[in-house]
Amino acid sequence: MNDMTPTRDQRAAALEGMGCKRKRVEDIRFTQGKGNYVDDVKLPGMLHGDFVRSPHPHARVKKIDDSEALKVPGVLAVITAETLKTVNLAWMPTLAGDVQMVLADGKVLFQNQEVAFVVATDRYAADDGINKVVVEYEPLPPLVDPFKSMDPDAPVLREDLAGKTAGAHGPRKHHNHIFEWTVGDRELTDAAFKKADVTIKEMISYHRTHPSPLETCQCVCSFDKIKGELTIWGTFQAPHVIRTVVSLIAKLPEQKIHVIAPDIGGGFGNKVGAYPGYICAAVASIVTGKPVKWVEDRIENLTATSFARDYHMTTEIAATRDGKVTGLRVHVLADHGAFDACADPSKWPAGFFNIVTGSYDFPTAHLAVDGVYTNKAPGGVAYRCSFRVTEAAYCIERAMDILAQKLGMDPAELRLKNFIKPEQFPYHSALGWEYDSGDYHTAMRKMMETTNYAALRKEQAEKRAAFKRGETREIMGLGVSFFTEIVGAGPSKNCDILGIAMFDSCEIRLHPTGTGIARMGTKSQGQGHETTWAQIIATEIGIPADNIQVEEGNTDTAPYGLGTYGSRSTPVAGAAIAMAARKIKAKAQMIAAYKLEVHEDDLEWDIDGFRVKGLPERFLSMKDICWAAYNSVPPGMEPGLEAVSYYDPPNMTYPFGAYLCVMDIDVDTGVYKVRRFYALDDCGTRINPMIIEGQVHGGLTEAFAIAMGQEIRYDEAGNVVTGSFMDFFMPTAVETPHWETDFTVTPSPHHPIGAKGVGESPNVGGVPAFSNAVNDAFSFLGSTHIQMPHDYWRNWKAAKELGAVA
Amino acid sequence: MIPGSFNYHRPASVADAIKLLSDLGEDARPLAGGHSLVPMMKLRLASPAHLVDLHGIAGLKGIRRDGDTLLIGAMTTQHDLLASDEIAKSVPILHEAALLIADPQVRYRGTIGGNVANGDPGNDMPALMMTLGATYRLEGPGGAREVAAADFYQGAYFTALEPGEILTSISVPAPPAGHGYAYEKLKRKVGDYATAAAAVVLTMADGKVASCTIGLTNVHETPLVAADAAKAVIGTNLDSAALKKAAAAAETIMSPAADARGPVEYRKHVGGIMVTRALQRAASRAR
Ligand SMILES: Cc1cc2nc3c(=O)[nH]c(=O)nc-3n(C[C@H](O)[C@H](O)[C@H](O)COP(=O)(O)OP(=O)(O)OC[C@H]3O[C@@H](n4cnc5c(N)ncnc54)[C@H](O)[C@@H]3O)c2cc1C
């Protein structure tokens, strides 16, 4: 063998396939300011639309006078609900089976609700026009507190639902009730509680917050009257779903709708659903015959397009005296605001909240969720988590700490004692899921050893003693979190969106010169799909990742897919990519056999081509097979080398992880410092460790923000008081703690490459780690549960209520 | 978040600026760095019909020492303050405080004149100017006058500026050599205004406080000088009783608004803590 022949390792490395820390190819354009976002779309004659919004949280709309607005130079049209009624679009369906006003129809139900859409030749004129639209309101009493939604005398919010005793998810108990969803065995659970040595009960709130991507929601709609075609460039996490929804509600043939999601500046769940801006821009384009752009500003994004969370979870655990859990009972009051605009799979009104048994072997459990209306913005979306999974993880992880405190046990020990054991997988949970794989004990012990957990506990004990002696004003908390996620929605047997099964797809075409293009039904918003998808293909079929162009987001070219959210891209589209690649490989093997003049079964795959078993020099590279596919295929075979796969996953995937947060809090000011944060993630097979690390860093930063201050808050009168980044906590690099990342690898047994998904794990596992750290810090002063967010003044308030400050 | 339309003027001299402002009247506003005014215009909380940009006027920018006084031109940016050796040497508290204002982008544009003329209780420079005993030079149709920083602030966004007047420079008496100083600012994150902040300039003699001035930011509708608090520590070695007394005295004059930074009680409480910490840190620096 001469020296120039690459070794097997060199050949494998040259592919930059799975496991390689390949640099993100999309960053070449992003770091040079050459991305192409929706707001970069500028079409000839393009108009701009913007909203008149309600200053009232609840009011009757008596009159809308647009006469002065229409006199503003540049203002062309003012669209109201009355205009939309002529095309039957004053209301639109939500993904959750509710309906939502596109523009105020007789009433407004939350502050900043869309009331009228002003269309003008530029954004300045549109805003001038907005200020000239005169709306006459008759204020109505606002309903802000979800706990009062179902009071007998609570104001009626949704007059459109009058007389409707059932909604999309069953009976309604009250005029402000949306649904009740129950899972589990009530009797068995009640019995477990009766027999329990020890029980805990706590109302654990997960406050309202917002995904707040840096790029807000926006679109450009362009209707071609001659062709009868509508093209929409938009910030869409799920472009195909948008196309279908538009077709259904606007009654346009689906083939005449072209949806294009260009580069997207973050989504985090905010860009899954449909918003009034999209409908109004489309209608405005149809009415004016010109392209119309709608770009949401920061205040609008924070206060009108979907919020996340707002779950109030009354949680009870039954346990034996020595700390074995025997039952879980949870009741959730879910605040959806004015319309149930949840972006969950259609049959799941509370998402996958029934993952709330977490990583623990609960013999029985019962869950009930009541959804209610309030005078707040509609939602809520899954903010960097699979549907309601972060709420569930927070609920159980906080409750386990509360139980540990009551039992006088270490929270880590309590978890180790109750984990589902490796030999129990696949594990059937009391609330109906089948966990695919896991090794929780190993992950937890690795976390405890790496962080020297025992030494930290010892230091904490010393600090507590010093605090009690008056030698320090700082308290120390250790936040343990062990989460199990459920991602990869999902199998057609239980997941659909508006009737469309939640599969995903990939189409790969290889070119004669040994390169190719691959298109998927997913849509990256920063996750780095252009990089990682090519890596899967590289490993599967031996074409270097650099030679695979990845393209997403254009519904005319990409195969139908359900999009990117809920950590579903790798579990579902990632599987479709591997399956499409394997179809190609199978054909390639036939071509190779023909060219090498052997039987297919005499070939073996070797990194980047096929080799004749036992004759190592008889080898045909994938590159050569590509060429052959276009000129010398076996007789009877079609030329070309391409494949499509639509993948309906047999099950969800269940990533997990062990996190630890070490925090110090100054009781006098409430100022905290995250001294250390360790995150061990097990996402199964790791496609690109660098991208995983980036995803974990980003998710932890969001978790940190949420737990420590990021909230959408309303005052008692229903005014939203957190409408800008001054008050809505968006940490900068200065506030963000240092992250230590680690991993174990437990592949998914049912996924073609064993990958489980990671994008949302850090948000799901991070929030309880931070909150548990704060709660753990205060626990020795006598508290059991302090609600999030844990910003400075609330920490001080906790210290004060516990008698730690005068 | 789109401002209304306005006319833009860029005069080349102070006289032209004053003339423009006088002629155009109420509808005209001087524009300096724009980092307070433009956000208000985007929210349409301010809709001036005319902006008179001061950037074209030579001589409004710069830092110069004249005997024991530092003269700072109104259009000097926060970044210029941070880059100045003279400031770092003579009035280091200005350097320390400027670093706590917003972020580098804002500091490259935002000016000291705009910061002190704005009249927002959240601005950091006004309390410092009061603490340092600075005076502002105001020039208007009626000529020039000097107003002490301590007499300038009348209420939130209400100042001694008369129609047509602009603030052209600030004179800051350099504190005595060997003075101790500290600016303690509690904020939620980079780019946030103070939950509460305290400025302290003091001198020590024989381990005791010989002189002391304390200023307070964002705990009242105007910046404050906490005279009683300062009195409480003069002659003491800043023992815990003296510090407590000072914090309590400072808290009695605070009347912050409740906002997302916290309820009134919290903002006063941490205001007292900022005073305590600023006193301790200032004393540790005094020679
Ligand atoms: C994100 C962000 C965070 C910030 N954080 C802080 C902070 O922590 N602390 C802080 O102190 N500031 C903060 N600021 C405000 C910033 O320091 C501003 O730059 C400053 O308040 C105003 O200075 P300017 O030069 O930008 O003035 P402009 O915004 O141009 O003007 C402000 C006001 O003063 C008037 N004015 C300006 N110059 C003169 C003059 N020479 N004579 C008469 N009137 C004049 C204007 O007409 C206007 O009414 C922040 C700003 C931003 C955007």
Image: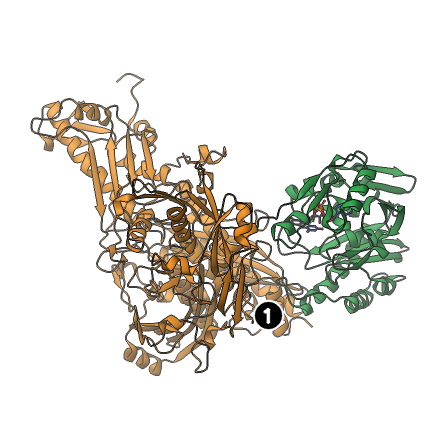
Q: Position of residue B62 (x, y in %)?
A: 80, 36
Q: Quadrant of residue A612?
A: top left
Q: Position of residue A419 (x, y in %)?
A: 35, 64
According to the image, what is the colour scheme of the structure? by chain
Q: Residues within 10 Å of mark 1 (few under 14, many from 20)?
A: many
Residue type at mark 1 is: Ala
Viewer-side residue, B144 vs A608: B144
A99 left or right, relative to A38: left
Viewer-side residue, A178 vs A797: A178
Q: Measuring 37% from the left and 76% from the top, which residue is drawn there?
A: A320
One can see residue A444 in this view: yes
Q: Measuring 66% from the left and 51% from the top, which residue is drawn there?
A: B47
A630 up-or-down from A271: above or below: above
Mark 1 residue CB less than 8 A from any atom of ligand 1: no
A424 left or right, relative to B136: left
In the picture, one chain is green; tell me its letter.
B
Residue linked to disc 1: A798
Q: Secondary structure at mark 1?
A: helix
Viewer-side residue, A418 vs A71: A71
Q: Measuring 82% from the left and 64% from the top, which residue is drawn there?
A: B239
From this viewpoint, which residue is outermost toward the top?
A: A2
Look at the image and give the colour of chain A.
orange
Count of marks overlaid on the render: 1
Q: Quadrant of residue A642?
A: top left
